[in-house]
Amino acid sequence: MELQKIIDKAKIAPRRLSPRELEYLLSLESEEEQQLLFDAAYQVKLAYIGRKVSLRGLIEMGNICAKDCLYCGIRRGNGAVHRFELDLDAVERMARWAYEHNYGSLVLQAGEVESEKRTELVEAALRRIMKLSNGELGVTLSLGEQRDEVYRRWHAAGARRYLLRIETSSPDFYRKLHPDGHSFFRRRRCLYVLRKLGYQVGSGVMIGLPGQTAAQLARDLRFFARADLDMIGMGPYLPHHATPLGRDIELTPIYRRRQLMLGLKTVAACRLYLHDVNIAATTALQALAPDGRERGLLAGANVVMPNITDTCYRKDYFLYENKPGSDENSAESLAAFERSIAKIGEDILWGEHGDSKHYLSRTATE
Ligand code: 5AD
């Protein structure tokens, strides 16, 4: 296969690439070819979005989790984690800080809990955020699998976007990573329900999981197209020593570099394949290299989610170890972030929702 031909074909229109072509892009080894891929993806991003970065202030609302995912540091079975849940006033305070600092949107994220108490807490938080911002802040939820009725109530209370990573699009691999009985099929159905309820829907996978192949990642990208997603959040897998999957993995420089490059290649291939979706440059990229997020933006991503949770909670929200920014406060994170964006010649979209172009065009024609 020839790289330039695949790139030319991908640029003409979205969703053109075959599974084998996607796999080829994800398998590129030479630095020169990888750079060609990143540059091509950046050009596609420029055509749809321009030199612009959308911000979401991330509030980590709580780390109590009913699930026992083999890769995750806050899995139910990790007894060493100090569990917390923010109360309404704390969420409101962090949201107000974001509003006053001209953030256009927020993400409320937490471990997966299904209960009436949780449902009501989120509803109340949404109402307070709408009130304090005169309805201006766009709110994305990232609160896991819920009953249809719960999604409906949160939408009615003002949430407009939902992130629910499928983690892997292979039901067999999913079962291996989640042996505690939770179902790939329920998770996938949630994505369809969210879409039907009118949410902008985001999903994604972890990149570079032990046992994952490039062919599988290529199928993940095809899954994103089939699910007609509006937003993609993907990040490299990072080991956590207190988890079954990460226990024996050593974070060597070679391993870090491989995860980083695979992460960047997957972001770039995703942009070349889907064109108009929002793609996040995730914190996991930054965990592998200090400029990982910026490199993600230069490989086709257009969204960054700076953590705006109070510093005192951050060390309890380690999905993986070496998570960056855990000893910074939100103002410091913001200042460092602004400098790094200016350095790569991009502009931050202050005060804007930064809706997915894909969502806007699919709802305009529906
Ligand atoms: N490395 C990278 N990402 C992880 N997540 C959970 N554990 C890890 C890990 N060890 C991701 C999952 C989840 C999101 C909130 O964090 O994809 O959906």
Image (cartoon, rainbow, N blue to C red):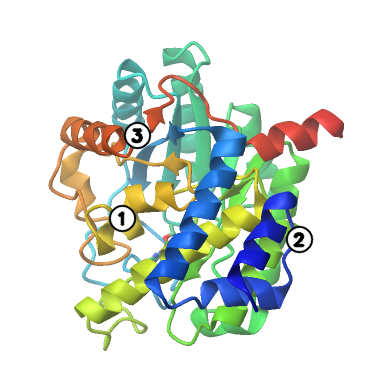
Residue 220 pos. (x, y %)? 63, 69
Report the residue at 43% width, 34% height from top. 53
Helix, strand, or loop for circle 1? Answer: helix
Residue 76 pos. (x, y %)? 38, 69
The quadrant in which the C terminus is found is top right
Q: Check disc 3 and report the residue beneath it.
A: 345
Q: Check disc 1 and report the residue beneath it.
A: 292
- Tell me the CA gap for discs 2 and 1: 28 Å
User: Mark 3 near mark 2, Cβ–Cβ under 8 Å?
Assistant: no
Considering only vertical position in the picture, is 95 above or below 256?
A: above
Helix, strand, or loop for circle 2? Answer: loop
Q: Nearer the viewer, residue 66 or 52?
A: 52
Report the residue at 33% width, 25% height from top. 98
Looking at the rendered structure, the kind of residue marked 2 is Arg
Report the residue at 26% width, 89% height from top. 248
Q: Nearer the viewer, residue 40 or 352?
A: 40
- Dot 3 or dot 2, earlier in sequence: 2
Report the residue at 26% width, 52% height from top. 291
Q: Quadrant of residue 198?
A: top right
Q: Quadrant of ligand 1?
A: bottom left
Q: Nearer the viewer, residue 57 or 116?
A: 57
Can residue 72 be spotted in the picture? no
Q: Check disc 2 and report the residue beneath it.
A: 16
Q: Which mark is residue 195?
A: none
Looking at the rendered structure, the kind of residue marked 3 is Gly
Helix, strand, or loop for circle 3? Answer: loop
- Tell me the CA gap for discs 1 and 3: 16 Å
- Dot 1 or dot 3, earlier in sequence: 1
